[in-house]
Image (spheres, rainbow, N blue to C red):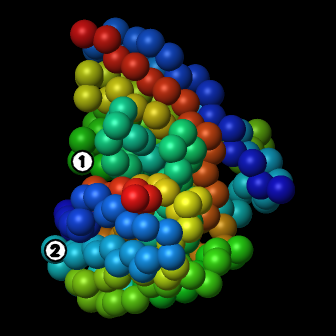
Amino acid sequence: EIVLTQSPATLSLSPGERATLSCRASQSVSIYLAWYQQKPGQAPGLLIYDASNRATGIPARFSGSGSGTDFTLTINSLEPEDIAVYYCQQRSHWPLTFGGGTKVEIK
Amino acid sequence: EVQLVESGGGLVQRGGSLRLSCVASGLTFRNYSMNWVRQAPGKGLEWVSYISSNSRAMYYGDSVKGRFTISRDNAKNSLYLQLNSLRAEDTAVYYCAGGLWFGELTFDYWGLGTLVTVSS
């Protein structure tokens, strides 16, 4: 099973700052990694697919990068509505796996 | 508009069984594979199971293999998950999820979830 390790567990930033979230895979997943945003009390929503492609309707301040085992989700100019838990997910190997999540808080 | 609506959750005793359903609308259901993903209270996401569009392929996470069974009825636009031999650690919100636009294993549609509580 591919283990996805996300860091940090919690990120506390002020509005307008840049958030950098990391996802590291225990073995290569090529580019087959997605990022999801889960706001409190809601189902997750897709942000990024195949490492660097924004899903439909996702603001340009969200960007993804990486390949192989190291991936990054960047939120440029953090806004209050970005308060959420962010998860990475790989689809390279069965079983599909998710990272443990990074909680983004506003200072 | 694509909608996925889960039902069937509830309180069940350890060792008991439950059947979850997910009804899909706004899409040609028979064309898409589907998945179940769960989330224990206050915890992260865990993929549970996958079924192909024609039910020929099914996969399970290690923690549920041999106890849970995924199925679908394309005529009813419905996805199911049979949960047997339930354990306390199966307590979670169960989401049905599908990948329509960005690859079948990238989940761009999710239901609101149904809560399963296993009492000991």
Residue in the foreground of this view, choosing between B68 and A33: A33
Image quadrant in which the C terminus of chain A is located: bottom left
Protein chain holding label 2: A
Image quadrant in which the N terminus of chain A is located: bottom left
Left/right of residue B20 with respect to residue B78 in the rendered view = left
What kind of residue is marked 2?
Answer: Ser
User: Which secondary structure lies at badge 2?
Assistant: loop
Counting from the top left corner in percent of width and height, residue B119 is at: 31, 11
Q: Residue at x 23, y 68 (%)?
A: A7
Residue at label 1? B62
Measure how far apart labels 1 and 2 are at the Cα level: 17 Å
User: Relative to residue A86, is residue B103 depicted above or below?
Assistant: below
Counting from the top left corner in percent of width and height, residue B69 is at: 43, 37
Residue in the foreground of this view, choosing between A37 and A96: A37
User: Relative to residue B101, is residue B3 depicted above or below?
Assistant: above
Q: Residue at x 18, y 79 (%)?
A: A27
Q: Is residue A17 visible?
A: yes
Residue in the foreground of this view, choosing between B89 and A45: A45
Q: Quadrant of residue B27?
A: bottom right
Q: Quadrant of residue A73?
A: bottom left
Counting from the top left corner in percent of width and height, residue A11 is at: 32, 63
Protein chain holding label 1: B
Mark number displayed over residue A18: none
User: Which secondary structure lies at badge 1?
Assistant: loop
Residue in the foreground of this view, choosing between B111 and A62: A62
Q: Residue at x 25, y 59 (%)?
A: A9
Q: Is residue B50 visible?
A: no
Residue at label 2? A26
